[in-house]
Image (spheres, rainbow, N blue to C red):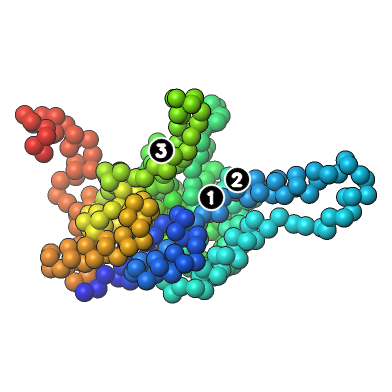
Amino acid sequence: MNMQTQYLGLTLRNPVIVGACRYTADMKSIKQIEEAGAGALVIKSLFEEQVRLESLKLNQDLHKYDDLHAEMVTLFPELKHAGPDEHLMWTRKAKEAVSVPVIASLNCVNREVWLEYAKQLAETGVDALELNFYHMPADFGQSGKEIEAEQSRLLKEIKRSVDIPVSVKLTPFYTNMLDFINELDETGVQGYVLFNRLFQPFIDVEKEEHVFPLYLSPSDASRLPLRYVGLLHGFTPADLCAATGIYTGEDVARMILAGADCVQVVSALYKNGIQAVQTIIGQFEAWMKKRGYTSIEEFKGKMSRKNIPDPWVYRRAQYVQMLMKGNPMEM
């Protein structure tokens, strides 16, 4: 049985990718991910905010005694913050340590930082680069189209500055996702990851303070990427990777039937450990055998908008049909 799939010009032994997380930030667990059979892995993201914070802390530590004695300043050697350099070095070592494709992940805010780190990550030898695009509204006067145009220009610049495949991990909050992806297609981007889960603030009402609990994707969170994968298959030249809510081999099969080339798993690992990768792949293989499929290409996109007779399945009409039933719970 052939479970191989193509993603970003790379041949994956199967469609299960471990997304960026703490498991892909440790050499031991990275090797375990490879041994568990993952098709590829995404290194934990390099965040601009993290780098800037560490740089600021270093600067404060170097100069906190400046006012004690004027001559003491000369005792400190000329030091440079190594935050991004350390990440780049580690990414290079991770790529050298495993044989499966390794994808770097970048999460920035400012244009010049995006461009600088994208180029440096590409030079580590990774197989591809994943850009995490998002925008938290802060300006009441900025339109959605302005935000999209800015991100599209940025993607064009990054594409020109690197010579490895690039994918974009998007949030689901664009006004018209299909129109925006159509615009991004013009940059030559090779793939889309649907979708990124943003940090959301939370308040402990007893302590009346902000807290940051770990929130895993519920299994039904896969329905949103399923919808957009099904809508996009056959209408974009880029590859499609479904993320969020992938816990079983059946979830993988569902996404590929809709038109995905691969999936990313993270919450499943947090909940069930790295062995979840092997379990998911085994379940997916069993599903293929049961259905009589010998390769992914035989059924990829079979249930997409492009290939089904009912054009309304991925639209509002299915909700209306549910409401018109005598007992909606029977659906």
Disc sitting over residue 107 in the figure: 1
Q: Give whichever of 226, 47 is nearer the camera.
A: 47
- Please, which residue is most extreme toward the right here? 71
Q: Quadrant of residue 161?
A: bottom right
Q: Amino acid at mark 1?
A: Asn
Residue at the image point whose x is 48% and y is 26% from the top: 207
Question: Residue 29 appears at what percent x and percent y?
Answer: 44, 64
Instruction: Say which of marks 3 and 1 sits in front.
Output: 1
Q: Amino acid at mark 3?
A: Phe
Precedes in sequence: disc 3 or disc 2: 2
Contact between labelled residues 2 and 3, with CB atoms less than 8 Å apart: no
Total numbered badges shown on the rendered structure:
3
Precedes in sequence: disc 3 or disc 1: 1
Residue highlighted by disc 3: 173
- Please, which residue is most extreme toward the front here? 206
Question: Residue 223 appears at what percent x and percent y?
Answer: 27, 44
Q: Quadrant of residue 198?
A: top left
Mark 3 to mark 2: distance in Å?
A: 22 Å
SS type, badge 3: loop
SS type, badge 1: strand
Question: Residue 150 appears at what percent x and percent y?
Answer: 54, 43
Disc sitting over residue 49 in the figure: 2
Which quadrant does the N terminus fall into? bottom left
Q: Is residue 48 left or right of residue 260?
A: right
SS type, badge 2: helix
Instruction: Say which of marks 3 and 2 sits in front.
Output: 2
